[in-house]
Amino acid sequence: MALIEVNTEECIKCGICIAACPTGVLVMGEKGPEELMTQNCIACGHCVAICPKRAINNIKTPLENQTELKELPPLDKETAQQFLRSRRSIRCYKDTPIPQDKLLELVEIARFAPTASNGQGISYLIINDKQLLKRVTEVVIEWMEAEVLKGPKTHWSLPLHIRAYREQGLDNILRDAPHLILAMAQKDFVRGRENSVFSLAYLELFAPSLGLGSCWAGIVEMCIFAGYAPLLELFNVPKDKVITGAVMVGYPKYKFKRLVDRNPLEVHWL
């Protein structure tokens, strides 16, 4: 079966689909674009999405499955800057669970993030159970205590988080967030972590539009990537998969009033 179909009556042989193809699958023939190296197709959908005449179809990314772009007003520079800069790591959450349909909206947008060679391959585990989340914190604390005993090379923050938990009952691991979202990939997928970072970054940027806040669960990730079995057993991850990222999510308890500055820009030119 052919990879692409071309409506020769509509095709104007502009060559845009060929130029947009990142892997050189197409060439221009007498009647329009033709397949040259079908095996190189990564199913990115560029050829179909960019055609001005809806004249090309690709069985890997069918035209009928693509959504027409709406003519929305362009996002002006100031709005775009504020949107990006106003994203904050939320560490104080309301004790309010997020409805399941809203959580699904959140991870749904994550799957549209760019991935290396359109590899995608990321799935998600959403933890809602309060008792399980409390147990996650307890197990991570136990791992941290074992790490501190190994000597001074452990991360500087571990003793502080342990003391806060043991002496004050403060959860600096999951920050009492009502949900934890874990990204997962196949064990043999070399781009798993990289693609997860892209996907969870999309999730974090989209979260405020749903009234939600998020924060990377960095210490949980440290424990996971260290292969700490008691924590991994809590998640019951499929045997053929590994956890590649972790983000806590909930309704922000407070609202930020100002944009925080960063270190001065450093640029080198060649």
Image: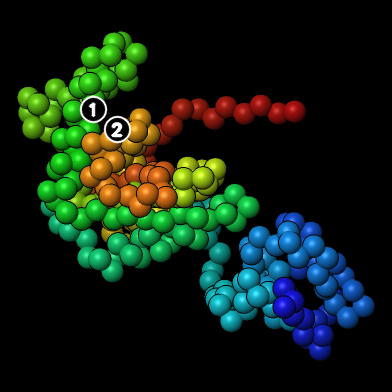
The crowding category of the residue bearing disc 2, from other C-alpha atoms within 10 Å (few below 14, some 14 to 19, many at least 20), is some
Q: Quadrant of the C terminus?
A: top right
Residue at the image point whose x is 32% and y is 49% from the top: 237
In the displayed structure, 100 sits above or below 184; it is below
Is disc 2 in contact with disc 1, using a CB cutoff of under 8 Å?
yes
Q: Residue 69: percent from the left, percent from the top?
A: 57, 74
Q: Quadrant of the N terminus?
A: bottom right
- 47 or 25, which lies in front? 25
| Model colouring | rainbow
Quarter of the view holding residue 234: top left
| Discs 2/1, front | 2
Q: Residue 124: percent from the left, percent from the top?
A: 37, 55
**Residue at mark 2:** 228
Q: Find residue 118 and name its label.
A: none
- 145 or 214, which lies in front? 145
In the displayed structure, 255 sits above or below 111; it is above
- Number of callouts: 2
Q: Which SS class for mark 2?
A: loop
Left or right for 114, reference 146: right
**Residue at mark 1:** 143
Q: Residue 14: percent from the left, percent from the top?
A: 83, 73
Residue at the image point whose x is 23% and y is 36% from the top: 230
Left or right for 33, reference 127: right
Asked whether residue 2 is in view, the answer is yes
Residue at the image point whose x is 67% and y is 66% from the top: 46
Residue situated furthest top in the rendering? 152
The crowding category of the residue bearing disc 1, from other C-alpha atoms within 10 Å (few below 14, some 14 to 19, many at least 20), is some
Mark 2 to mark 1 CA distance (whole Å): 7 Å
Residue at the image point whose x is 70% and y is 81% from the top: 54
Kind of residue sitting beneath label 1: Trp
Q: Name which of mark 2 and mark 1 comes first in the sequence.
A: 1
Asked whether residue 113 is in view, the answer is no
